[in-house]
Image: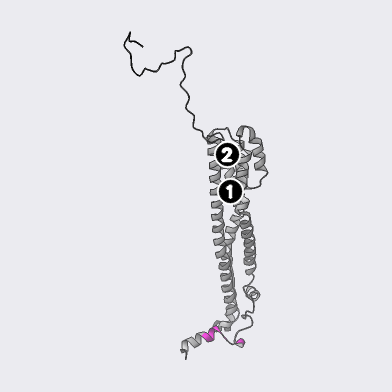
Amino acid sequence: MLPQGVLVVLAVANPPAGAVPDHLRVGSVWDLLVKGGPVMIPIILCSLIAVAIVAERLIALRRSRLIPPPFVPGLKQVLRDPSRDRAAAISYCESDPSPIAAVFAVGIKRLGEPLDLLERHVSEAGERQVQRLRVRLRLLSVLATLAPLLGLLGTITGMISAFQTVAISGEALGKTEMLAKGIYEAMITTAAGLIVAIPLTLCYHWISSIIENRVAEIDGLVSEFVEHYALNGGRPPQIAAPQAELKPAGAPEAREPADALEPAGAPA
């Protein structure tokens, strides 16, 4: 047989159907949301907006959209000679909507300028693209902060409702079932706020890490571009072939020394 203490816990956790008041019985998720009170409405709105933002950012931050695999090889085919192919390369970049194409377009337009000035313009173009990648992330952070605060507000309103019941009816002080509705509302809103805030915080940092990885990859490709086209003039460095020794015009040709000197007057 089970100990008496365990039986008491099971009886409390699984009360008979008739022992649960109607205003506390939960038959579905909708019942749980309704019993959370009016504060549940903004909490639900926060969760719906956050789900839309997370889905949109995950789609927008796919690598195939930020760094299309055919872009860099295609650009190298177009930009064979920076002095002649610059206009075609700029047109090629502007036809691509990806962030890496926008950064490369700025770099190609600035080819021929001093290296420090070229790097500054490319860096500014990269920062503008990073701001575009981080769009709506601030709102996601605000929602992750707002949800538990709304849950706390629901806790306060629920406790106010409970104590208001005590103030109105003097008999409620000794009857917990008359206070349960307000306390129930307080606990539901607190749990709902945390349920929304915790995943949002994780999603915010996850999306931020995706952006950092994409930006680092774009930065590596741009650095390679600057080294190749700005420092080497768009051509791989070549080793100069050794030149033949130049001789002044009219100078007599040097004669090779004989293997053995013959004495003067010696017969041939």
Task: In the displayed orientation, state which residue is furthest to the top.
Answer: 265
Query: Is residue 150 in sight in this rendering?
Result: yes
Identify the amino acid type marked 2.
His
Q: Which quarter of the image is occupied by the C terminus? A: top left
Q: Position of residue 51 (x, y in %)?
A: 63, 62
Q: Relative to residue 46, is residue 62 depicted above or below?
A: above
Find numbered disc 2 in the image and state the secondary structure of the residue it sits on.
helix
Residue located 61% across and 59% down the image: 54
Magenta stretch contains residue 12 = yes
Q: Position of residue 18 (x, y in %)?
A: 62, 88
Identify the amino acid type marked 1.
Val
Identify which residue, 210 or 10, lies in the foreground: 210
Find numbered disc 1 in the image and state the secondary structure of the residue it sits on.
helix
Identify which residue, 102 or 146, lies in the foreground: 102
Magenta region, mostly helix, strand or loop? helix
Residue 191: quarter of image: bottom right
The Cα atoms of the two marked residues, 2 and 1, are separated by 14 Å
In contact (CB < 8 Å): disc 2 and disc 1: no
- What crowding class fits label 1: few (fewer than 14 Cα within 10 Å), some (14-19), or many (20 or more)? some
Residue located 62% across and 52% down the image: 64
Magenta stretch contains residue 20 = no
Mark 2 sits on what residue? 121
Identify which residue, 219 or 145, lies in the foreground: 219
* Mark positioned earlier in the residue sequence (2 or 1): 2
Which residues, given as a range, are shown in magenta? 10-17
Residue located 54% across and 55% down the image: 209
Query: Is residue 119 in sight in this rendering?
Result: no
Please give the count of numbered marks on the rendered protein: 2
- What crowding class fits label 2: few (fewer than 14 Cα within 10 Å), some (14-19), or many (20 or more)? some
Q: Position of residue 49 (x, y in %)?
A: 64, 61
Mark number, residue 130:
1
